[in-house]
Image (spheres, grey):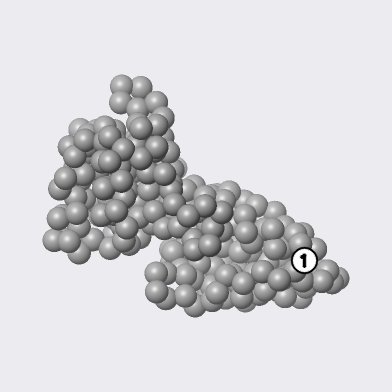
């Protein structure tokens, strides 16, 4: 983004993580900010129950980005935040998951700081942990995995380096959690197998993790692509690869999400 000359600023921008979808996983600090915000600029994956937490008096701006459907370009979103911070005291940038985990929060914070805008980050629970948990898959387990790698399956063009080294990841991590990878899954699986992963390595795909509509596909690197095509399994999806996936069958039958999935916490 082109640097913007510093001008007097009335307000502050809060980069708030909305979590993966279940409103019960929204942080108390984030909820309080939504209740007191003058402006909320929100992403496409923020769930409706969390949007309902926003004050009725707040100006709400949809800055959602979905594959092939961008309501605002990234530079336009940042420009909006800068403009609103010069007009209103409390501006919330509401992002799905955590702002700093594949959420472009770092980019937005850089631009805001360069424009002289006060900014604060309020972390959120990232889908790479929450979605597997709601599918009864622990990303670490002393009997299965002592390491986990979080990686994006959708790389930016013109980035600092052109390609993720999937072969190195295959050799260096016992659990691999992939964000935004379903559209590139064929290439990812090929690279992981080239890196040494067996075709029988378990994989789980979790769609709309932590929401009432959550769905899972459980298979192996050899079978999952056929399952995806047969079930028309589309984004948003978190992929989990590794032996921890084998725990799904054991633990899922014991996990009760009937109340917590909708954020209904019973005292």
Q: Is residue 56 visible?
A: no
Quadrant for the N terminus in the image: bottom right
Q: Where is residue 52 drawn, in percent x and y?
A: 49, 67
The picture places residue 98, in percent across and down from the top left corner, at 53, 51
Please give the name of the residue rendered at 20% of the width and 57% of the height, measured from the top-left corner: 228
The residue singled out by tag 1 in the image is: 115
Q: How many marks?
A: 1
- Res. 54 in view: yes
- Position of residue 67 measured from the top left corner of the image (x, y, whole percent): 39, 69
How many residues crowd around disc 1 within 10 Å: few (fewer than 14), some, or many (20 or more)? some
Q: Residue at x 21, y 35 (%)?
A: 198
178 relative to 91, above or below: above
Work out whether 57 lies above or below 127. Answer: below
- The quadrant of the image that shows the C terminus is top left
Instruction: Farthest residue to the right: give it.
Output: 8
The percent position of residue 263, horizontal first and vertical second, equals: 41, 52
Q: Nearer the viewer, residue 36 or 158?
A: 158
Instruction: Please give left or right for residue 82 compared with residue 246 in the image.
Output: right
Q: Residue furthest top?
A: 143
Please determine whether, in this image, residue 79 is positioned above or below residue 101: below
Going 41% across and 44% down the picture, which residue do you hit?
A: 165
Q: Secondary structure at mark 1?
A: loop
Query: Splitting the image into 4 quarters, where does residue 80 fall?
Result: bottom right
Camera-side residue: 12 or 221? 221
């Amino acid at each position: 983004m082109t640097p913007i000359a510093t001008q007097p600023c009335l307000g502050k921008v809060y980069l708030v993580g909305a979590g993966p979808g279940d409103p019960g996983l929204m942080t108390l600090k984030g909820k309080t900010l939504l209740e007191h915000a003058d402006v909320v600029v929100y992403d496409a994956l923020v769930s409706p129950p969390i949007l309902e937490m926003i004050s009725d008096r707040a100006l709400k701006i949809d800055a959602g980005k979905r594959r092939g459907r961008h309501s605002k370009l990234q530079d336009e979103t940042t420009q909006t935040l800068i403009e609103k911070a010069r007009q209103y005291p409390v501006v919330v940038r509401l992002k799905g998951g955590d702002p700093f985990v594949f959420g472009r929060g770092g980019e937005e914070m850089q631009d805001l700081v360069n424009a002289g805008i006060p900014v604060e980050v309020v972390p959120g629970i990232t889908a790479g942990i929450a979605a597997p948990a709601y599918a009864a898959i622990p990303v670490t387990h002393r009997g299965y995995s002592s390491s986990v790698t979080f990686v994006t399956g959708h790389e930016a063009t013109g980035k600092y380096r052109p390609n993720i080294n999937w072969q190195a990841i295959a050799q260096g991590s016992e659990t691999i959690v992939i964000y935004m990878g379903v559209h590139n899954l064929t290439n990812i699986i090929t690279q992981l197998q080239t890196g040494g992963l067996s075709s029988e390595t378990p994989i789980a795909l979790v769609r709309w993790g932590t929401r009432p509509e959550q769905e899972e596909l459980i298979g192996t690197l050899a079978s999952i692509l056929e399952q995806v095509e047969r079930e028309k399994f589309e984004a948003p999806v978190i992929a989990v690869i590794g032996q921890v996936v084998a725990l799904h069958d054991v633990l899922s039958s014991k996990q009760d999400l009937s109340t917590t999935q909708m954020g209904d916490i019973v005292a």
